[in-house]
Amino acid sequence: MANPTTTATATATLWPMRMRQSLRQLERAFVAEAELDRDRRESLRRTAERRAAKRRAERTIRQGRARFIVLSLTLLATAVIVAVVMFRALYLILE
């Protein structure tokens, strides 16, 4: 039969070794989790940058369309005004 003091001594010597092994496992798990967290943050940052760039591009296109429409309407209005003024002047001259 096993001597109780021998069993207690064996358990006492195994405990620090188990503790060290457990700490190593915890450290490895922590390092792995930290690396995953860094990768996740980097991925989220890249995704956010892509979304922001896409929004900027869409906003630039919208603004460009609006400017083109305003320019076209301004040119059309100028042509109409010039034609009306020219024909009124021609009417006054020929009258």
Image: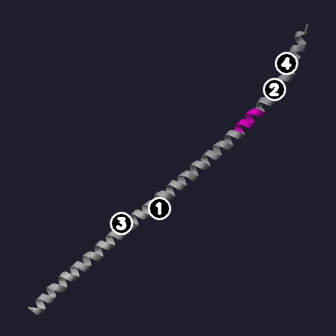
Q: Nearer the viewer, mark 3 or mark 2?
A: 3
Badge 2 crowding class, 10 Å Cα cut-off, few under 14, some 14 to 19, many 20 or more, is: few
**Does residue 40 lie above or below 50 as drawn?**
above
Residue 66 is tagged as 3
**Does residue 25 lie above or below 95 as drawn?**
above
Give the residue drawn at x 85%, y 23%. 14
Question: In the image, residue 21 lies at what x, y percent?
Answer: 80, 30
In-front residue for pair 6/38: 38
Left or right: where 34 falls relative to 63:
right
- The residues tagged by marks 3 and 2 sit, at their Cα atoms, a distance apart of 71 Å
Left or right: where 94 falls relative to 2:
left
Q: Amino acid at mark 3?
A: Ala
Q: Who comes first in sequence, dot 4 or dot 1?
A: 4
Q: Nearer the viewer, mark 2 or mark 1?
A: 1
Residue 57 is tagged as 1
Q: Amino acid at mark 1?
A: Ala
In-front residue for pair 12/27: 27
- The residues tagged by marks 4 and 1 sit, at their Cα atoms, a distance apart of 67 Å
- The residues tagged by marks 4 and 3 sit, at their Cα atoms, a distance apart of 80 Å
Badge 4 crowding class, 10 Å Cα cut-off, few under 14, some 14 to 19, many 20 or more, is: few
Q: Nearer the viewer, mark 4 or mark 1?
A: 1
**Residues in magenta?**
24-30
To which residue does mark 4 refer? Answer: 11
